[in-house]
Structures are given as C-alpha cells and as structure tokens.
Amino acid sequence: MGLTAVLGDITTMDVDAIVNAANSALAGGGGVDGAIHSAAGPTVLEECRAIIAKQGSCPTGTAVATFAGELPATWVIHTVGPIWSQHDPIENGTLLANCYGSSLDVAAEVGAKTVAFPAISTGVYGFPRELAAPIAVSTTLDWLNQNKQNTSVETVTLVCLDAENLRHYQQALDEMT
Ligand code: ADP
C-alpha cells in the first residue's frame, strides 16, 4: 500500500487504472480528458457513449469505468470533478473528495492494484490547487486505511503535469504521512 506523487503525463502511466477528469456527459474535451481520449483511441469514447445512453449523465463526484483502448493501462475510471464556480467552498471540497473515493471504489470493483490520478478539477474547472492537493491526499489515505483488509488497490500515484501541483502534493504528503 502506498501513496506517492510524481511529475508526468498520466496517459503514459503503466498502471492498471488511470483516472480521467471527465465532464458529466463523458463527452471528451480538453486538458487531461482530451489527452486520454486521443492516446486511447475511439473505443473509450464509444464505451462512454454507451454508459450515458444507459444511465444518463454522470453526477459530480461519481465515477464509472471503461477499458483503456490503446493506453498502457487496462482501465480508465472517469470521474466528474466539481466546477469551482458552481458550489460553495465546503460543497466543492466534499464533491472533490467524493471523486477520489468513488474512483477508488470503482478501481477496487474492477480489481485494479495500481491506480493513477490527475489533479482533478485543478485545470479548466478552477479548483484552487493549494486546496485540492490536501483533499486528494487525505481522502486517498483515508480510503486506503479503511479498505486495506479487503481491496485489490495497493498503490496510488498522483500524477502532476507541472511542478506547482507536485509541490502542493508533496507538502500535503509531508504533513499527512
Ligand atoms: P478539470 O476540467 O477537471 O479542471 P483539466 O484537464 O482542465 O481538468 O485539468 C486537470 C489537471 O490535469 C490540471 O492540473 C492539468 O495540469 C492536468 N493535466 C492536463 N493534462 C494532463 C496529462 N496529460 N497528465 C496529467 N495531468 C494532466
């Protein structure tokens, strides 16, 4: 069991499951979502469309899994982060924590041992990075602690595209581990 933060591009991560910062329509888009779909190829978007056709749009804070197409990972877990401007700060925090918790629940359901997350909501969705990092770290640590007896999930990697986010993660990890 372990939680680490690294600098990198999540599409290259050789893990069982990568998490995607998706929108509620699972429609693809820019940022990490666009990078994942373009590296994975069209099958991921086809699976996303089938999920939406079956269950409707995905509420903020929830997560669903598809296969990962041409990516090194086996699964993509699509979670819908909160849009900072649409909620008050407390609600934003709860919804962001729900993204990490529900994604880890789905990772366990598919039997993933290794999971990588991007910094959900800290791009276009506008969640302040210094607030998002401690929520990501504390929620993941709590989940790993609570589920350690009965989960496939062994390691979680928080993947940052830039040094600023890595600094926030490292500070949170230093304080909490
Ligand atoms: P959101 O809409 O949830 O804010 P974004 O994709 O705009 O999603 O940004 C979320 C975070 O993902 C940002 O911190 C951004 O720097 C990061 N990011 C963008 N592309 C990648 C990538 N290929 N790998 C890892 N992180 C990425």
Image (cartoon, helix red, strand yellow):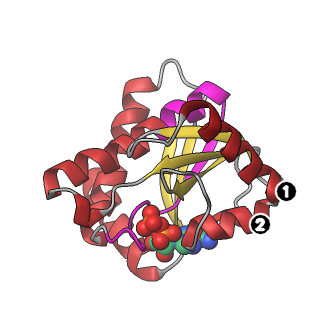
Q: Nearer the viewer, residue 67 or 109?
A: 67
Residue that numbered label 2 is attached to? 39
Amino acid type indicated by mark 1 = Glu
> Where residue 147 sits in the image (x, y, percent)?
44, 25
Q: Residue at x 74, y 55 (%)?
A: 14
> Where residue 141 sits in the image (x, y, percent)?
37, 42
Question: Is the residue marked by circle 2 packed among few (<14), some (14-19), or many (20+) residues within 10 Å?
Answer: some
Q: Nearer the viewer, residue 53 or 48?
A: 53
Tag shown at residue 101: none
Q: Residue at x 57, y 38 (%)?
A: 64
Contact? badges 2 and 1 (CB < 8 Å): yes
Amino acid type indicated by mark 2 = Ala
Work out how far the residue at label 2 is from the one at label 1, CA to CA, in angstroms: 7 Å
Name the side, left or right, on which 63 lies relative to 34: left
- In the rendered view, tell whether residue 108 sits above or below residue 117: above
Q: Residue at x 39, y 80 (%)?
A: 164
Q: Residue at x 66, y 35 (%)?
A: 112
Under circle 2, the secondary element is: helix
Name the side, left or right, on which 133 lies relative to 16: left
Q: Which residues are magenta?
A: 103-126
Residue that numbered label 1 is attached to? 70
